[in-house]
Amino acid sequence: MKPFSKRMPNLGTENAFAVIGKAKKFEKEVLKPQGKSLVYLQIGEPGFDTPENINEAAIKAIKDNQTHYTATPGIPELREAVAKLSSNYSAEPYSEEDVIVVPGGKPVMFYMLNALLDEGDEVIVPNPSYPIYGSVTEYLGGKMVPIQLKEENDFNFSADELRELITPKTKMIIINSPQNPTGGVYTKELLEEIAQIAIEHDLWVLSDEIYDRMVHDGEHISITSVPGMQERTVMLNGCSKTYAMTGYRIGWAVTKNKKMADYIEKLACNDTSCTNTISQYAALEAITGPQDQVDYMLNEYKKRRDLMVSLVNDIPGMSCHSPKGAFYLMVNVRELLDKLSITADELCDRIMKEAHVLILPGTVFGLFGDDFVRFSYVSTEEDIKEGLSRIKSYIESIYQP
Ligand SMILES: Cc1ncc(COP(=O)(O)O)c(C=O)c1O
């Protein structure tokens, strides 16, 4: 058999999916026969159903026979609505031509990195972070340069730390605020400093703002609010998290760089032709229809966050700050790991097998995640209480501070 491409071994994946696969198998083969089940506190998607008006819009689209191809960058009404929405954050208003609708937030990463990277180009990537940034960078022959998000700085980095990592090969910086997995939010000052550095060194920016509506304290700030940034930034966003529409697969790239917009459109045309038409009509309703469900979900997340933070901090060897955004809790377990001489991966495995709760090791999100485990607080209050109570009993049985 002829060999696979040399690129292929460099492609990573989202190990969170592998962890879930393992957990489901364990639940089915070991727990179920004993009448037991796992509590899932690792979930990376909204714990709510898609609002009814959005599902109705999808059903209407089918009944209206909106089941054919659309233009690659999306239906004009949706592009216009996204442009208007994105303009809430930007220095200058966006227009329809600045928007390319794609099947989810994820493809934006793939397309932008494809449009930019040549062998050896460097991309500065926050760490810990969403694993796909680094995976696609390395797959394309680029070099991922991690910048550490530090717990003591509310999971921000400093401008000096960023400057130190820039070399003549640096082509782009990826930022994500609010962040997965830390729940951190970049300060306005940091965003302005990143913008200044990007302009100074002529760098591109991928600004992943998929959790923009989930800022619990204060308001969302985008790097595109800094004058001069809209031409060098691709803003990534979509419906998955805000509207609980992960399965609809709908997202978008927004940029005032015409050449970049053209290349993203070309890549999308080669890849998928267009985004699912039914999903586009559902997204249009999501953005332009009533927003009360979004407010409700956000309010619920805030309550669940507060509950989870207080319960986690009551477990010996675990500590966390209250995250400012998204729906994740990055919990420091270093003390526990050192005392038990185990890794975060092993701790999560033990918690699954012994306490019957699924959480993720921070290492799923990069090397600087090794002091942490990630919880998500999208689950119901009941599940949060049950899961944390199980973990507390288990940890107390194996560790005395
Ligand atoms: C930071 C971040 N960006 C992008 C995505 C991908 O979103 P989508 O499901 O719309 O592709 C996720 C999903 O978990 C995410 O956490």
Image: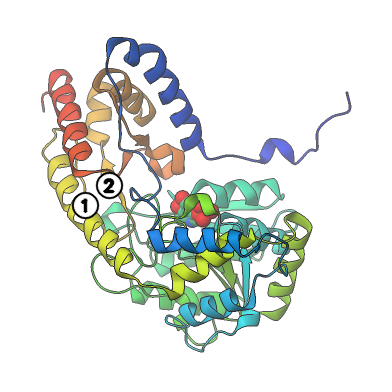
Mark pair 1, 2: CA separation = 6 Å
The residue indicated by pointer 2 is: 377
Residue 187 x %, y %? 33, 71
Q: Amino acid at mark 2?
A: Tyr
Q: Is residue 113 left or right of residue 226?
A: right
User: Label 2 crowding class (10 Å Cα cut-off): few <14, some 14-19, many 20+?
Assistant: many
Residue 312 x %, y %? 17, 40
Asked which secondary structure carries label 2, the reply is loop
The residue indicated by pointer 1 is: 305
Residue 206 x %, y %? 55, 66
Observer able to see residue 237 = no
User: Label 1 crowding class (10 Å Cα cut-off): few <14, some 14-19, many 20+?
Assistant: many
Q: Residue at x 48, y 83 (%)?
A: 87
277 is higher (above) or lower (below) than 94 = above
Q: Residue at x 58, y 65 (%)?
A: 280
Tell me, yes or no, whether the two marked residues, 1 and 2, touch with CB atoms within 8 Å.
Answer: yes
Of the numbered discs 1 and 2, the one sitting upstream in the chain is 1
Q: Is residue 277 left or right of residue 214?
A: right
Single out the residue that lies furthest toward the right: 2
Nearer to me, 348 or 161: 348
Residue 79 x %, y %? 59, 76
User: In the picture, residue 220 is in which quadrant?
Assistant: bottom left
